[in-house]
Image (cartoon, helix red, strand yellow):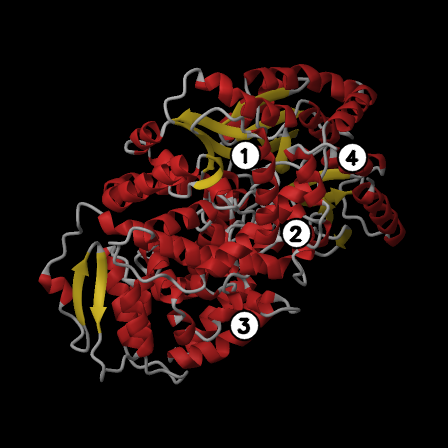
Amino acid sequence: MDTSVSRLREELIGREDLIGRAWTKAFTKGVDAWLTGLLPSAGRVALVAVGSYGRQELCPYSDLDVIFLHAGLKRVEDVASEVWYPIWDSGVGLDHSVKTPREAIAVAKTDLRAMLGLVDVRYIAGDKGLAAELGSKVNALWQRDWKKFLPEISISMKSRHNSSGELAFLLEPDLKESKGGLRDFTIYSALLRARSFDAIPEPNLMEASECILASRVELHRRANKAEDRLLLQEQDQVAASLGYGDADQLMMQVSESGRRIGYSVAGLARHDRAPKPKVTPSQLTRNPKVRYSVREGELAVEVPEDARLGVADVLEIASLAAHLMLPISTGSLIGIRDRIDYSGQPWPEGAVSQLVSLLGTGKEAIDAIESLEHVGIFSILFPEWPMVRSKPQRNAYHRFTVDRHLLEAASNASKFRREVHRPDLLLLGALLHDIGKGVSGKDHTEAGIELLVPIATRLGLSERDREVLIKLIEHHLLLADMAMRRDVTDPSTVERVATAVGDVETLELLWRLTEADSLATGPAAWSHWKEALIVELVEGVRAYLAGDRVESGVSKYDSEFLDELVASSGEGCAVSVRPEGLFVAAPDRPGLFAAVTATLSMVGFSIVAADVFNHNGVAVEAFQTFSEWADESNWERFRRELPRAISKPEEIEKKLGERRKHYRKRQYAAESVQLPPKVVIEADASERATVVEVWGPDRIGLLHELTRTIAESGLDIRHAKVLTMGDDVIDTFYLVDSDGSRIVDVDRLGQLEDDLLKVIVKP
């Protein structure tokens, strides 16, 4: 019978009754037995497991971390190879070394990775005395020198967290390397083993590590490889395997687990921080109810037993910590929570000012509020907060959970607090704009407006301020939607936005909230292109509200550049690649837009956004594109292929078809969270043209197929907007008849809708 570790792994992968630590222990036990049979009788030798193998946390495709210990055995490498070769032959990853106990300790003294691995050393087979010798020396070394390793631990954690992000707030977290992941829990456990370490173990951390470990086991099991990033398309299946109702329940639990671990390990590793923050006594003499001090890089807050803290007191403490850029110690947070005197009554005077002061610190406010929420304080002050806490947003457009998204938006908004007349309303609007996402089964904007009423009452806001915040929540997507899905130079678009916002002050707040919200959403939600469109729209609306006539045009592009581009097009076409995008100018003709989009797809570019307009009688098409391997050679190929695509569209169709067969766009999202395919025709959205929107999942060459279908229907594209959101697209076309008029024929529009829907649902 095949007793190799690969065979054992296959058998256990099929054991659906084993999940999480039960699975890793079963796998570890089997691997131990197998390796024991491989160890030759050759004097004082032993096999010991370190790292995840030492902790009995072997996931299906984890490497085996093994040390072949010996007591000065000659030709030891030859003997050890009798163990290594069968492992290599089995196809299992192996991280191995051959050392005496003294050699292993010598390496650990200067190598953090080796030290942390040895902390979890565990005997497998052979000479128990040799393994015990190593274990006792490792323990003594770690107890003696753990403080020496703290600076390096802090630096390595910071680098890893910057690279992999925070598990608690990410759409697709790395279960091992992200802040709050399994590697952080390993560090936390190792630090707690240092007997002299004065720290209180955080509650529920073992439960948190179990959740993440179980998710990693199932992820390996499903992916059939060492995959540690919990991708969207895997979340439904992992959730089902672990017994969760759906992926949202799984990701909320993963988020909570990562939050606990990340906060706890950061607190332990912080005790070495140097240089210490320079804090003057005057900065710490504020509220007579509490006494402040700075200890080991943390703000310590002592609250007398008989003192009671109101909302303003708590927010003042958080604001002080944020302004001083000091974390509040965990013990202090618990003491503050236990002495809060608040049960939902209206906030006292000064409390909102303290909240605004806190939010105005930007990134520091995120840390301070997350610290409060670590022990549940922020949820006491904001009873609506638990509805959004750790709530996932399962689409490729968002990168954070709802609660972290709101804090990131408020942090971004703080950068504009000197550019608007009411920075307090901007910060509050950013903090609350998506609060309605905590209400399931209801449009989040409508739910947010309903929630704002009791919130505004509790905060003691005036009627006018409440109305402005309602507008910010109601229309927080308006500017972005209009900029990316409508012609911002169309008077109908400008009038619609102006009617919604009502006045210039609200327009300014909405403008800055839009940018803060977009930046907090993810990299695909903000660009120079989008910013330019929104600025142009805002200026048009500002002029409209001032009573000025709205002029049509393409002011976001340099007129002199457009004149030169059009002049160089002649009877053919002209191409220019600039920092703001790709520009193509050519005499207008049916199928021109389709030819350009086909060529871009064929040479490997994804179209993120597009704009089509007329300049001096020549069609100009502007594109914002993306390619992971774009360079000048790609653009040269585009320039060569475009004229052929215009003159011989059948050839580009064939080439694009071949490319589609060989390359498949990565599916970011599970089908359950993708946009449903639909075609929306808005005949009255513009006085210039009929507006047609196409929604659905993206694929290679989709835009080309849509524009070709439009051309074949005998319609002209006067303006186009392309909005790509991860796996999904919303493509908007301003269409006119052959005589330049809006399409009013109901039957023709119905046929167009059917034809476009067939394209979007085609596999």
Mark 4 Cα within 10 Å, few/some/many (few <14, many 20+)?
Answer: some
Label 3 – label 4 distance at C-alpha: 40 Å
Whichever of labels 2 and 1 marks the residue nearer the N terminus, that label is 1
- Amino acid, disc 4: Glu
Q: Residue at x 76, y 48 (%)?
A: 742
- Viewport quadrant of the N terminus: top right
Whichever of labels 2 and 3 marks the residue nearer the N terminus, that label is 2
Residue furthest out toward the left = 281
Tell me the tag on residue 238: 2
Tell me the tag on residue 449: 3
Q: Residue at x 68, y 63 (%)?
A: 245
Whichever of labels 1 and 4 marks the residue nearer the N terminus, that label is 1
Dot 4 lies on which element? helix
- Relative placement, left or right, of 720 versus 653 is left
Circle nearer the viewer, 2 or 1: 1
Label 1 – label 3 distance at C-alpha: 52 Å
Q: Residue at x 38, y 62 (%)?
A: 202
Seen from the viewer's position, the closer of residues 110 and 704 is: 110
Tell me the tag on residue 260: none
Whichever of labels 3 and 4 marks the residue nearer the N terminus, that label is 3
